[in-house]
Image: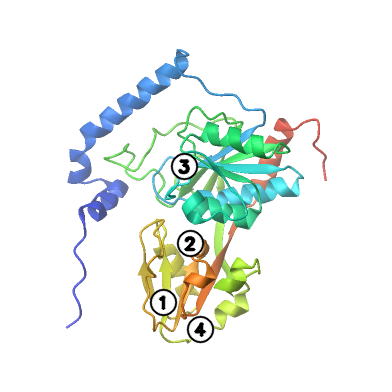
Amino acid sequence: MSPSLPRPTLADRLQAEWLQGGPLSAALLPLSWLYRALLALRALAYRLGLWRVERLPVPVIVVGNWIVGGAGKTPTTLAVLEQLRVRGLRAGVVSRGYGRDAAGVCVAGPTSTARDLGDEPLLIHRRARVPVAVGRDRVAAARALLAAHRDLDVLVSDDGLQHWRLPRALTVLVFDERGLGNGRLLPAGPLRQPSQPPATHQIVVYNAPRPSTDLPGFLAERRLAGAVPLADWWAGRAADMPALLALRGQPGLLACAGLARPQRFFDMLAGLGLDFEPRPLPDHARLDPLPWPDNAAGVLLTEKDAVKLPPQGAGAVPVWVVTLDFLPGAGFAAALDAHLQRLFPSRWTHD
């Protein structure tokens, strides 16, 4: 007899109804109306000048989304940072630092860990090699980063779209295939804010095979770039596809993913012909203790998980880090360039 599947939890049921609606979502509508009213009061406070958007000495690009869960903000942030680097602009990153132990503002340093910064900010710091500061108050984090790195030209906020005190010269809005879900605000739906018409200083990226809203935007492409042993990844060595394909046919592999939507990672691995046991973990899950047995033949990890596992903590099991290429779509670079020319007219040079 095959083992029975675990019964869906209340959270599983709610997330399913966030896509298409249902009785549980409908029952939560009064709370959504209350949430909408609170958002309207907050917007009114800003219009009346009771609260205000702060000022910073450099432009801020906010990468965010309207829907809860992993829509692809971090890979989009990395793509924006690469474009800024190519254009010779010195960028820093501010983020909330979800899942870290520390409180207050923390500026990344040479010995910073995921417990200091959070997994995604540390990944950005390592991958993009840019200064990073984290804090619930994104404005305070921005000021601390600018004080520590006075040569920065621009800041990128990984998330922070709903952090209204943070100024923004450009918004990069990210959607995945869920689009707007059932169109309802939290908690009856997945929306963190009401949907809005297209804005002037906004770029939309769809981390999906096709557009999932009516907003015009660019279709991103996600693909696996390859694999590299954990120790080599920490040493800064690049992953390559032959190393990943060499794992085809190896028995006993586990694939672990502490992501909001781990099935994407598993599907991409399976699409390359790898055989493995999928082991989904909670988003931002810690790897202490290790979530695999001591006798595992090998483990495949995402980079988001690898930043939480220094090589000395991996034990004797071989661990490979599987990296991702994220291409934000044809025309994205030109659209971003147009905004950068607006923000930096005196220093812009055409190719």
- Looking at the rendered structure, the secondary structure element under dot 4 is loop
The type of residue carrying mark 3 is Asn
The type of residue carrying mark 2 is Lys
- Going from the N terminus, do you reach mark 3 or mark 2 first? 3
- Looking at the rendered structure, the secondary structure element under dot 3 is loop
Q: Mark 4 — residue?
A: 248
Q: CA distance from mark 3 to mark 1?
A: 31 Å
Q: Mark 2 — residue?
A: 308
Foreground disc of the pair 4, 2: 2
Residue 167 at x, y = what percent? 56, 28
Q: Which mark is residue 119?
A: none
Q: Is residue 108 left or right of residue 313?
A: right
- Looking at the rendered structure, the secondary structure element under dot 1 is strand
Q: Quadrant location of residue 162?
A: top left
Q: Residue at x 57, y 43 (%)?
A: 133
Q: Quadrant location of residue 190?
A: top left
Q: Are marks 3 and 4 in contact (CB under 8 Å)?
A: no
Q: Residue at x 39, y 70 (%)?
A: 290
- Looking at the rendered structure, the secondary structure element under dot 2 is loop
- Going from the N terminus, do you reach mark 4 or mark 2 first? 4
- Going from the N terminus, do you reach mark 1 or mark 2 first? 1
Relative to the observer, which residue lies in front, 258 or 16?
A: 258
- Going from the N terminus, do you reach mark 3 or mark 4 first? 3
Pointer 3 local density, CA inside 10 Å: few below 14, some 14–19, many at least 20: many
Q: Is residue 46 left or right of residue 203?
A: left
- Going from the N terminus, do you reach mark 1 or mark 4 first? 4
Relative to the observer, which residue lies in front, 182 or 117?
A: 117
Relative to the observer, which residue lies in front, 104 or 205?
A: 104
Q: Mark 1 — residue?
A: 254
Relative to the observer, which residue lies in front, 205 or 319?
A: 319
Q: Mark 3 — residue?
A: 65
